[in-house]
Image: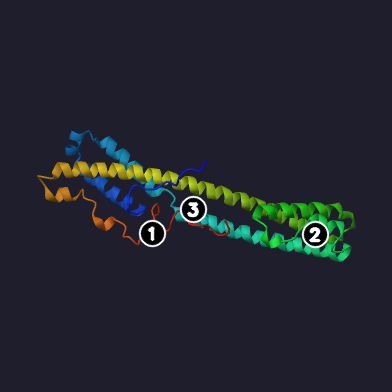
Amino acid sequence: MKTSVNKTNFSMSYADLAGISKQKVNTVIRDIAEFERFNVTLEKVNAFKAMVEEFYNTQIDQEHRGVIVATTEQKNELASRVKHLIRETIMYFRHTYGANSKYVNAMNISELSSLTDLELERRAVSVVRVSRIASEELPSSVIGIINELESTNEAFNNAIDTKSTLVELRDIAAHERVELANNIYKELMNYCEIGQLIWAETHEAKYNDYIIYNSYKKPDNSPPENSDSGEQGEDELPNG
């Protein structure tokens, strides 16, 4: 069953959340004596600090996306080469045995340009297999084309698998990062609420230290949620 997409429980960017949280950790440590009245110990604050550091050092979505885009480009280059080698092979069989020969019909390469990656990979396997049936009759140059098609198609298949794995890892990382961000935001707001309560009537400057100003909020035309600096984590990648 398809699960719903995780959303953040706040409107600031990930970069702002990490930066503000690191600042507020230092502020809470400054006021730790007052916070201990609310069962907020230095140990707990340091645990929160470690969680913020983990979040800050986590690979951002743009990095995941960049790797996937590079892998996609490599996969597409291999796909183009596979198609070219299939067409070269078919050209030989058509000219040698005829357009309606048993070999050409068995290879079935109609609408080659419209095949999905997986369909193309399987079609290439079929072309190599059928070609090998006639291997004793083929010149060495054509055998070289078939061998290159086989090796290129293996690399293409590996690229398909690699991209699929990277997309899955990106989705998992995005989900985990949203969960971690939401936990950090919840804890941050808890500390700010306590800090404001502590200093509300006695120290205006320290009270203000626990206010998250509107300047950290995303404007209405800002990037979507779950982003680090502008790009949507759900962005569509090239060619699926």
The residue lying furthest to the left in this view is 202
In contact (CB < 8 Å): disc 2 and disc 1: no
Residue 209, x across and y down, in percent: 19, 50
The first of marks 2 and 3 along the sequence is 3
The amino acid beneath tag 2 is Gly
Q: Camera-side residue: 49 or 128?
A: 128
The residue lying furthest to the right in this view is 137
Whether residue 167 sits left or right of residue 159 in the image: it is: left
The first of marks 1 and 3 along the sequence is 3
The amino acid beneath tag 1 is Pro
For label 1, the SS is loop
For label 2, the SS is helix
C-alpha gap between disc 2 and disc 3 = 38 Å
Whether residue 157 sits left or right of residue 128 in the image: it is: left
C-alpha gap between disc 1 and disc 3 = 18 Å
Report the disc number at residue 223.
Answer: 1
- Residue at 64 percent of width and 50 percent of height: 158
Whether residue 140 sits left or right of residue 120 in the image: it is: right
Q: Which residue is mark 3?
A: 64
Residue 39, x across and y down, in percent: 22, 33
The amino acid beneath tag 3 is His
Quadrant of the frame with the C terminus:
bottom right
Please name which of the two marks, 1 or 3, marks the residue nearer to the observer. Answer: 1
Q: Quadrant of residue 191?
A: top left
C-alpha gap between disc 2 and disc 1 = 51 Å
Q: Camera-side residue: 133 or 47?
A: 133
- Residue at 81 percent of width and 54 percent of height: 106
- Compared to residue 191, the image places residue 236 above or below, namely below
